[in-house]
Amino acid sequence: MLGQPRDDEALARLAEDTADEARAYLKTVHALARGEAEESALAVLMVALSRIVSTGARLGAVTDVILEDRYEPYSGPDADYEELHLGLAQLLAGLDEYIEIVDPLVSGELSQESLSNDITEIAAALGHGLIHFDHGRPEEALWYWQYSFMASWGD
């Protein structure tokens, strides 16, 4: 699909596949944040992250999805992910925080980050796209997932 003319059928399949993977990711991280699969939580989390990054890579490999109206219509409020974030922070206690070099080419400025926040941001982006998808707007969902992957959670 990369570099090829737009194929609406392929995009519809990609939207469905991405929605399925988004639901699986959300189900998994919510279960882990509630304390399920405690003994294998880190392994399960790594699999979930690997799967969703693979899904995101597919989004990054296709031609840019551009909405016909060039704007994202309001679909209602996003879900609250604070409980998810707190549960993940507890799950990852002792492993959660890390230091990142903001821009190694320009400066040595460091930034303190957290895995629980990163994982929650991915969940929020996927959930936002699912709102569009579940309202029968798969192209908008695909646009949002692609945009958020490239702009945020893909790195």
Image (spheres, helix red, strand yellow):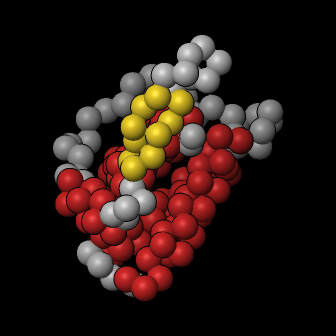
Q: Determine the image quadrant of residue 8.
A: top right
Residue at (33% x, 69% y) in the render: 91
Comparing 48 with 116, the one in front is 116
- Residue 73 visible, this angle: yes
Question: Relative to residue 2, is residue 28 drawn left or right?
Answer: left
Q: Is residue 122 above or below residue 94?
A: above
Comparing 111 with 54, the one in front is 111
Residue at (39% x, 25% y) in the render: 71
- Residue 139 visible, this angle: no
Q: Is residue 44 above or below residue 22?
A: below
Question: Relative to residue 1, is residue 147 drawn left or right?
Answer: left
Residue 77 is situated, as x and y percent measured from the top left of the image, at 19, 44
Quadrant in which the N terminus is drawn: top right
In the displayed orientation, state which residue is furthest to the top: 106
Residue at (59% x, 49% y) in the render: 56
Residue 55 is situated, as x and y percent measured from the top left of the image, at 61, 55
Residue 114 is situated, as x and y percent measured from the top left of the image, at 38, 48
Residue 53 is situated, as x and y percent measured from the top left of the image, at 59, 54
Q: Is residue 137 above or below residue 24?
A: above
Comparing 50 with 5, the one in front is 50
In the displayed orientation, state which residue is furthest to the right: 3
Q: Is residue 132 above or below residue 55?
A: above
